[in-house]
Structures are given as structure tokens and as C-alpha cells.
Image (tube, rainbow, N blue to C red):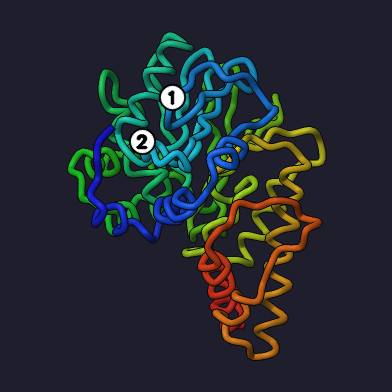
């Protein structure tokens, strides 16, 4: 695992990496394990930084273990295989994470990934993308906004990452992209909410959604770049009426109960932020007084700065109205 300096790590505070690091520092070991262990799928490979979980024939989810302190992947991701190609989802935090997943793709499917999709620009999802460009050179796909933000904002600078993204095939920011892997079609759907340019990766058979950071399972999300009104709309748009597997950007694989709990949680934040904004309460004071109701169950949160980020994001939106 490449060791990053504290300065480089903290420079990525606009991503979720620092958010996760702050949680990891104070999370008990039992809760760390519980946060990533789900009842969906079968673990086929396990490393200190992530598990690879088979969800269906030809579909695997990377469930990262960021609370362990290992920064190789940090974010979740996955593989979707067809008869003609293999899609790897996310570039992860370090190139070693992407290289590990590419090697698992070859081991499990007989081929290196042919395509790579990045859901948004944050460093834990994008900085390691050059790790795929080893034995083979898959087609990297990202929206123009995501590509431009990675190149402009993410640190430390990396020539290999820059080269990988400069040669990327750009996804539409307004229209779905249909990716035929041979017997399996993936829809890449442009969305926003966690950032101003997110995408989800969606399948109909089986009904499955790789949500990126539009869904966090059992951990309070990072609102640092959030557009909360769009986040609420995107979360509702991802919700299906039939049994569906949801792969979050962080946390265990979820089904409808976990997904609905997440939507209820962001709704609770919205109600509290709107009420406080209407009464003229400063965002920091409103956040300090806020707590999630017991009815929403347990959420990993040990620093109220995360609440303050959420209220600040809502105040930005409400001040524009």
C-alpha cells in the first residue's frame, strides 16, 4: 500500500477520505466490522482494506473497510461482467486498489476490465484510476465535470491519473449511456446531489443499483459538496418498487429496508435544517442541537462537524431560494 503524507491526505478534505478518517479514529472495532458486514451476497475475496462480495452471476461489489485505517480503496465499487466485456466501477483512493480489483476481474471472469466508470470526482472514488492501466488499457468513462474536477482539485498530482482521465470517454451529463457488455446491459445514469455531477450504474436483471455516494448505508454522509435538494430527488429516483440490491458508496450492501432508512434520515436532516433556517438560527448552532431520532436506528457518527456540514449545505440552498 502506498503511504500518503498527512498533508496530502488532508488536502483531499473535499472528498470523503478525511470524513472517513475522522470517523475511523473514534469508532470501536466491533462497530467498524458491523458497518461493512451485510447479509447480501457471498464474500469471495477479503483483504484488510475491502471484501469482494458476489451479488449475482457475473456481478460483484467491493465493500471497503475504511474504518480499519487502510486507505487502499476507501470507497465501495464493483464489477459487472458480460460475455463481451467487464465493467469495473470506481477508481478508488490509490492505484493499488484499482489494480487489485482488475486482478480479481481476471481471476473471476478470465479477463481484465474492458471499461471503468467513475461515479464522481472525490479522491476516494477517482484518484487510483491509473491502477487499471497495467496489463490492459480499459476505456475509462466519466462525465466531463467529474474529469475536470479530478484534474483541477484532487491531490497529490499524478501524471498517470492525468493521462488516464485525459484519454477518458466522456459520459453525457444529461442523457443515459447504455453499455452493452454482451448479454448484460448497464445504464449509466447522470445525476447530482452528492456533488454537481454524479452517476449511478443500473441493471434491470437482476434489479441492482450501484449508487455511488448518493446512498450511504448506516453512516452519516458527507455533505461537503452536497446539493441537498438534488440529493433528495436522486435518492428517490434510485428507489425501485421491486426487490432491488443497492450498493452504496460506503457501508454494507443494502436492500429496501436499509435504503428507506437512509431516505428517512436525509428527510429528517432536511426538516430540521428548514425549521432552523426559518427561525434564523445559525447553521453551527442548529447542528449542535440536532440529533437523529432513535426510530432511525444506529448511524455511525462521532463528530458533530458532519451535522454542521449538512446544515451548512442546506442553508446554501435555502439562501438561494
Q: Quadrant of the N terminus?
A: top left
The percent position of residue 242, horizontal first and vertical second, equals 81, 35
17 horizontally vs 235: left or right: left
The quarter holding residue 117 reads top left
Residue found at x 68% / y 27%: 40
Q: Nearer the viewer, residue 64 or 102?
A: 64
The quarter holding residue 164 reads top left
Note whether 30 is above or below 319 in the view shown: above
Residue 232 appearing in the image: yes
Q: Quadrant of the C terminus?
A: bottom right
Residue found at x 68% / y 67%: 291
Label 2, secondary structure: give it.
loop
**Reading the chain from its start, which is encountered first: label 1 or label 2?**
1
Residue found at x 55% / y 58%: 302
The percent position of residue 163, horizontal first and vertical second, equals 22, 40
Residue 176 appearing in the image: no
Q: Residues within 10 Å of mark 2 (few under 14, many from 20)?
A: many
Label 1, secondary structure: give it.
loop
Mark 1 lies on residue:
47
Question: In this view, which residue lies farthest toward the bottom?
Answer: 280
Numbered tag placed on residue 154 in the rendering: none
290 horizontally vs 159: left or right: right
Note whether 311 is above or below 117 in the view shown: below
Is the residue under label 2 in contact with that under label 1 (CB below 8 Å)? yes
Q: Nearer the viewer, residue 66 or 12?
A: 66
Residue found at x 55% / y 67%: 304
Count of numbered circles on the image: 2
Q: Residues within 10 Å of mark 1 (few under 14, many from 20)?
A: few
- Distance (Cα) linking label 1 and label 2: 10 Å
32 horizontally vs 280: left or right: left
Mark 2 lies on residue:
72
Q: Nearer the viewer, residue 217 or 70?
A: 70
Amino acid at each position: 500500500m502506498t503511504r500518503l503524507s498527512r498533508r496530502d491526505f488532508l488536502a483531499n478534505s473535499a472528498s470523503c477520505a478525511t470524513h472517513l478518517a475522522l470517523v475511523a479514529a473514534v469508532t470501536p472495532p466491533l462497530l467498524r466490522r458491523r458497518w461493512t458486514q451485510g447479509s447480501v451476497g457471498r464474500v469471495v475475496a477479503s483483504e484488510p482494506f475491502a471484501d469482494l462480495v458476489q451479488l449475482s452471476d457475473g456481478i460483484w461489489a467491493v465493500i471497503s473497510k475504511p474504518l480499519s485505517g487502510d486507505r487502499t480503496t476507501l470507497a465501495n465499487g464493483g464489477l459487472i461482467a458480460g460475455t463481451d466485456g467487464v465493467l469495473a466501477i470506481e477508481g478508488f483512493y490509490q492505484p493499488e486498489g484499482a489494480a487489485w480489483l482488475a486482478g480479481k476481474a481476471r481471476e473471476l471472469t478470465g479477463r481484465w476490465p474492458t471499461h471503468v466508470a467513475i461515479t464522481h470526482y472525490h479522491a476516494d472514488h477517482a484518484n487510483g484510476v491509473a491502477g487499471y492501466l497495467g496489463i490492459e488499457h480499459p476505456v475509462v468513462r466519466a462525465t466531463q465535470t467529474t474529469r475536470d474536477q479530478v484534474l483541477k482539485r484532487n491531490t497529490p498530482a499524478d501524471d498517470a491519473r492525468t493521462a488516464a482521465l485525459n484519454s477518458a470517454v466522456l459520459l453525457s451529463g444529461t442523457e443515459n449511456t447504455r453499455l452493452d457488455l454482451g448479454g448484460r446491459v448497464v445504464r449509466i445514469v447522470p445525476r447530482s446531489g452528492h456533488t454537481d455531477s454524479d452517476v449511478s450504474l443500473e441493471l434491470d436483471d437482476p434489479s441492482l443499483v450501484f449508487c455511488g455516494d448518493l446512498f450511504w448505508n448506516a453512516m452519516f454522509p458527507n455533505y461537503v459538496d452536497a446539493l441537498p435538494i438534488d440529493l433528495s430527488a436522486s435518492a428517490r429516483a434510485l428507489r425501485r418498487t421491486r426487490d432491488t440490491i443497492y450498493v452504496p458508496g460506503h457501508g454494507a450492501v443494502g436492500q429496501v429496508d436499509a435504503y428507506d432508512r437512509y431516505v428517512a434520515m436525509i428527510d429528517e436532516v432536511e426538516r430540521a435544517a428548514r425549521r432552523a433556517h426559518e427561525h434564523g438560527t445559525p447553521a453551527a448552532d442548529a447542528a449542535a442541537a440536532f440529533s437523529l431520532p432513535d426510530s432511525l436506528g444506529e448511524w455511525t457518527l462521532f463528530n458533530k462537524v458532519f451535522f454542521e456540514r449538512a446544515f451548512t449545505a442546506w442553508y446554501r440552498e435555502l439562501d438561494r431560494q
